[in-house]
Image (cartoon, rainbow, N blue to C red):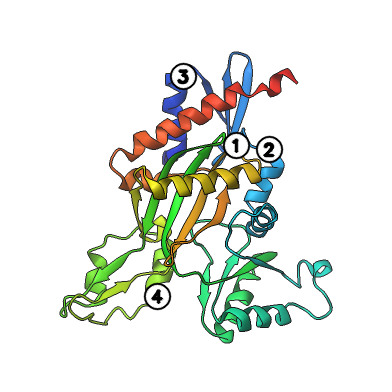
C-alpha cells in the first residue's frame, strides 16, 4: 500500500511538538490532531486551531457574516450581498425571488464578483461583466452552494495577507498577480510555460479563458488572472515595516478584535486609489505555498505556528 503523503501543516506541527515536548496523536483518519502536554489536551482540525471561540470561527468562515459584523463596527470592508439558493434555502427567499436583487446590484455597479459564501483559494469566484455572465456564474455556484455572495468589483493594486494572533500581527505579505510580458514573438502558451505556475485546478480554469495562441506585443503586459491567490500563480512578497505596514497592521487588528478572533489570517486589499479594505478573515491558518515560494518562508511560518501552540496551551479553559 502506498504511504500517505504528510500534509505541510502536519509536518511542521510534528517538528514543533518534538521541540516543545508535546505529545501528538492523529485521530479520525488524521482529520483531528490531538496535542497533549502537562495534563492539557488541545485539538487542531484541518487548519483550525483550538484557540478561537466557535462563534468567531463560524463568522470568519462565512464571507457575508464577516462583512456584516465588520460593517456594524465601522471597519472598512469590501461590500457583500448574500443570495440564498431558492432550491435549498427557500425559507430565506421572498416571493419575488433573487433576480431583482441581482439586477439592482448589477445596475448599480456594472460589474460584479460572484463567489461561494464559504470557500478559499479563489475557487468558484467569477468576475462578471454582463448579465448573462452573472446568471451563468450564479446558477453554476448554486449547484453546490446554499448561499453565495455578490460584490462590486474593486480595482485592486495589491492584496495583503496578515497573520493575526491575540491582538498582534506577526507577518504581512503582498500578492502580485501573475503576468507575462510580451516580446512580439512568443505566444501566450510559450510565455505562460516560463512562469511554472502551480498544477492547480484554479490555474487550469484561468488559462482556459486566455487565447494561448495570442502573441503579445513587445513589452505588452498580460495578466493571467484578475485574482491574487497564490494557488493561482501569484507571487508573495514580505512587506517591510513602514507606514503602509502600520496601516495594514492596524486595520487587521481592528478586524480581528471586531470578530473576537484569536488566531487567523486576515486578507486586506489596497485599491488603485490607495484605500484599504478587509476582504476576508480566515479561521483556518495555512501558508503552504507561501513557505515554498519565500526565502526563509518555512521558518517564518513555523515561528507563527509555534506562537499559536504556546497561546493554545496558555488558554485558561482547563480552570473553568
Q: Quadrant of the N terminus?
A: top left
Mark 2 vs mark 3: in front? 2
Q: Is residue 65 above or below residue 152?
A: above
Residue at mark 4: 208
State the count of labels. Answer: 4
Q: Residues within 10 Å of mark 3 (few under 14, many from 20)?
A: few
On the image, the x and y values in percent for residue 75 come to: 61, 53
Marks 4 and 3 close (CB-CB < 8 Å) = no
Label 4 with label 1: CB-CB less than 8 Å:
no
Residue drawn at x 71%, y 81% as measured from the top left: 99
Q: Residue furthest front?
A: 243
Q: Which residue is mark 1?
A: 262
How far apart marks 3 and 1 lie (CA) works out to: 21 Å
State the separation of the CA atoms marked 2 and 3.
Answer: 25 Å
Above or below — where is 290 with respect to 181?
above
- Circle 2 SS class: loop
Q: CA distance from mark 1 to mark 2?
A: 8 Å
Q: Mark 1 vs mark 2: which is more N-terminal?
A: 2
Q: Residues within 10 Å of mark 4 (few under 14, many from 20)?
A: few
Q: Which mark is residue 53?
A: 2
Label 3 sits on residue: 20
Amino acid at each position: 500500500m502506498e504511504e500517505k503523503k504528510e500534509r505541510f501543516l502536519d509536518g511542521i506541527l510534528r517538528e514543533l511538538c518534538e521541540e516543545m515536548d508535546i505529545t501528538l496523536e492523529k485521530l479520525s483518519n488524521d482529520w483531528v490532531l490531538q496535542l497533549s502536554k502537562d495534563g492539557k489536551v488541545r485539538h487542531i482540525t484541518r487548519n483550525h486551531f483550538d484557540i478561537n471561540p466557535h462563534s468567531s470561527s463560524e463568522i470568519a468562515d462565512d464571507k457575508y457574516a464577516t462583512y456584516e459584523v465588520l460593517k456594524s463596527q465601522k471597519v472598512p470592508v469590501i461590500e457583500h450581498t448574500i443570495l440564498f439558493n431558492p432550491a435549498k434555502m427557500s425559507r430565506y427567499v421572498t416571493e419575488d425571488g433573487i433576480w431583482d436583487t441581482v439586477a439592482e446590484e448589477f445596475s448599480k455597479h456594472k460589474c460584479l464578483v460572484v463567489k461561494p459564501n464559504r470557500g478559499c483559494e479563489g475557487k468558484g469566484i467569477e468576475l462578471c461583466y454582463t448579465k448573462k455572465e452573472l446568471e451563468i456564474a450564479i446558477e453554476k455556484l448554486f449547484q453546490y452552494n446554499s448561499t453565495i455572495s455578490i460584490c462590486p468589483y474593486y480595482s485592486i493594486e495589491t492584496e495583503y495577507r496578515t497573520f493575526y494572533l491575540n491582538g498582534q500581527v506577526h507577518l504581512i505579505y503582498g500578492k502580485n498577480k501573475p503576468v507575462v510580458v510580451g516580446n512580439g514573438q512568443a505566444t501566450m502558451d510559450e510565455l505562460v510555460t516560463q512562469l511554472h505556475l502551480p498544477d492547480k485546478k484554479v490555474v487550469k480554469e484561468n488559462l482556459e479563458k486566455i487565447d494561448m495562441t495570442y502573441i503579445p506585443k513587445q513589452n505588452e503586459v498580460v495578466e493571467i488572472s484578475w485574482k491574487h491567490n497564490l494557488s493561482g500563480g501569484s507571487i508573495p512578497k514580505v512587506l517591510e515595516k513602514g507606514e503602509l505596514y502600520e496601516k495594514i497592521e492596524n486595520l487587521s487588528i481592528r478586524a480581528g478584535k471586531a470578530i473576537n478572533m484569536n488566531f487567523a489570517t486576515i486578507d486586506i486589499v489596497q485599491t488603485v486609489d490607495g484605500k484599504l479594505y478587509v476582504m476576508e478573515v480566515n479561521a483556518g491558518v495555512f501558508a503552504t505555498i507561501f513557505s515554498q515560494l519565500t526565502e526563509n518562508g518555512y521558518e517564518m511560518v513555523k515561528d507563527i505556528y509555534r506562537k499559536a501552540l504556546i497561546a493554545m496551551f496558555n488558554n485558561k479553559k482547563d480552570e473553568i
